[in-house]
Image (cartoon, rainbow, N blue to C red):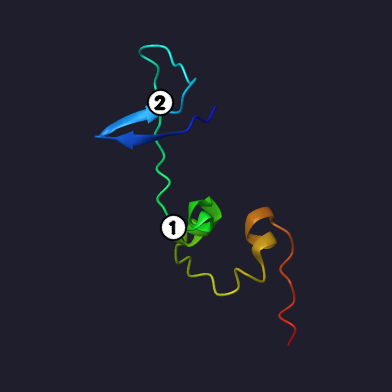
């Protein structure tokens, strides 16, 4: 579930009507004013996980490397 609130004097104050039991484990995700929604999308960070594979035809033959399909023709 998602609850909303604000920080006041260093304390998270949830919106009126929200009641959580003592000891509840929570995760705080900050929405900064002006922050682009697209930057929150995990797909936006996909390039953070890219690695150099050394495979020059990976884009062309991804199915070959992942699933063992025959390699695609190089078109030449």
* Left or right, 2 with reference to 7: right
**Image quarter of residue 59:** bottom right
Q: Tags 2 and 1 in contact by the CB under 8 Å rule?
A: no
Neighbour class for label 2 at 10 Å: few (<14), some, many (≥20)? few
Quarter residue 63 falls in: bottom right
- Local SS, label 2: loop
When the figure is inspected, residue 1 is found, relative to residue 45, above or below; the finding is above
If the image is split into quadrants, where does the C terminus sit? Answer: bottom right
| Dot label at residue 24 | none
Camera-side residue of 47 and 69: 47
| Residue designated by label 2 | 26
- Lower position in the chain sequence, tag 2 or tag 1: 2
What residue do we see at 52% from left, 54% from top?
Answer: 37
Residue under the image location 71 percent in, 68 percent down: 71
In the current view of this chain or complex, which residue is farthest to the front? 16
Residue 5 spot, x, y in % from top left? 43, 33
Q: Residue placed farthest to the top in the image?
A: 22
Q: Which residue is drawn at 46% across and 24% down?
A: 16
Residue 23, quarter of the rendered image: top left
Instruction: Please determine whether, in this image, residue 50 is positioned above or below residue 42.
Output: below
For disc 1, the marked residue is: 34
Q: Nearer the viewer, residue 58 or 8?
A: 8
- Residue 29, horizontal then vertical, whole percent: 41, 39
Q: Which residue reaches farthest left?
A: 9
Q: Mark 2 or mark 1: which is in front?
A: 1
User: Is 15 in front, or is 21?
Assistant: 15
* Relative image position of residue 41 (x, y in whole percent): 53, 52
Label count reads 2
Secondary structure type for disc 1: loop
The residue lying furthest to the bottom in this view is 76
Between 51 and 10, the one lying in front of the other is: 10
């Amino acid at each position: 579930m998602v609850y909303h609130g604000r920080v006041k004097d260093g304390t998270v104050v949830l919106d009126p009507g929200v009641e959580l039991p003592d000891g509840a484990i929570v995760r705080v995700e900050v929405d900064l004013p002006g922050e682009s929604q697209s930057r929150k999308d995990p797909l936006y960070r996909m390039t953070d996980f890219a690695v150099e594979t050394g495979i020059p035809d990976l884009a062309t033959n991804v199915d070959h490397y992942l699933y063992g399909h025959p390699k695609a023709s190089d078109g030449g």
